[in-house]
Image (cartoon, grey):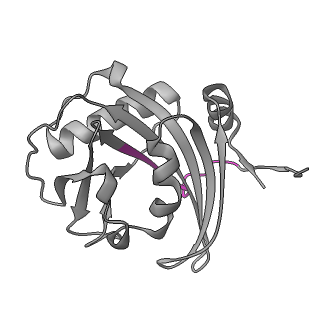
Amino acid sequence: KATVSVLYWNTTPDMLRSVQTLVVTNESILLGRWKSGDYKNRITGVALPTTAATDSQLKSQAISNVAGITGIKLPPRSVQKRAVLLFTEKQPFSLSVEHVFLAKVKKEFPLNKHQAYESFWAPLNNIPFNEMPQDDEVWYPTFLRQKYCLHGRFTFDGPNMLATDLWTVNQAELANINSEHQVFM
């Protein structure tokens, strides 16, 4: 029998908060290579910092981010919050939280060019994890099966992942995690 404890944290102005949106078809996923910033030359989903606080604001931000970077206008009904991930950076110490949304679309759309992010469609069975942050290979496969929502915690020292915990949760539990700012330990 596993023991689960809960750590509550306060969202502070200096705590990084971001929204990542993964847009998928039945056979492909929208990814992009960053041309600048902390993730320069790394591949991720559409992920940007946010100041949004509520789930509806986060969802609007997810839709807006995809439109602004790729030109794809997602119908709101196709976008669902599916994960809350907490990241701890050891040196220098920092905490960040990422709210991850899934958008299901019927086909690959043409992509606009963006100065900081080079978008492309990748086959779901050939995601380039070797060019992505290390945590992505841990949570993307379960996330993309679309059966569960996820709650996770990752500890990094620079680009190196030191520890990870990942739990499957239902939609109500995920909403509760967001509203109470809790992390399972």
State whether residue 41 is above or below residue 15: below
- Whether residue 139 can be seen here: yes
State whether residue 139 is above or below residue 175: below
- Numbered disc total: 0
- Whether residue 17 can be seen here: no
State whether residue 93 is above or below residue 117: below
Residue 143 on image: x %, y %? 49, 44
Instruction: Report if residue 17 lies within the magenta region.
Output: yes
Quadrant in which residue 32 is drawn: bottom left
Q: What residue is at 31 percent from the left and 50 percent from the top?
A: 124
134 or 27, nearer to the observer: 27
Residue 126 on image: x %, y %? 30, 59
Q: What residue is at 25 percent from the left and 52 percent from the top?
A: 123
Quadrant in which residue 182 is drawn: top right
Instruction: Report if residue 102 lies within the magenta region.
Output: no
Q: Which residues are magenta?
A: 10-21
Please give left or right for residue 11 compared with residue 115 in the image. right
Residue 140 on image: x %, y %? 46, 52
Residue 179 on image: x %, y %? 65, 32
Q: What residue is at 64 percent from the left and 42 percent from the top?
A: 168
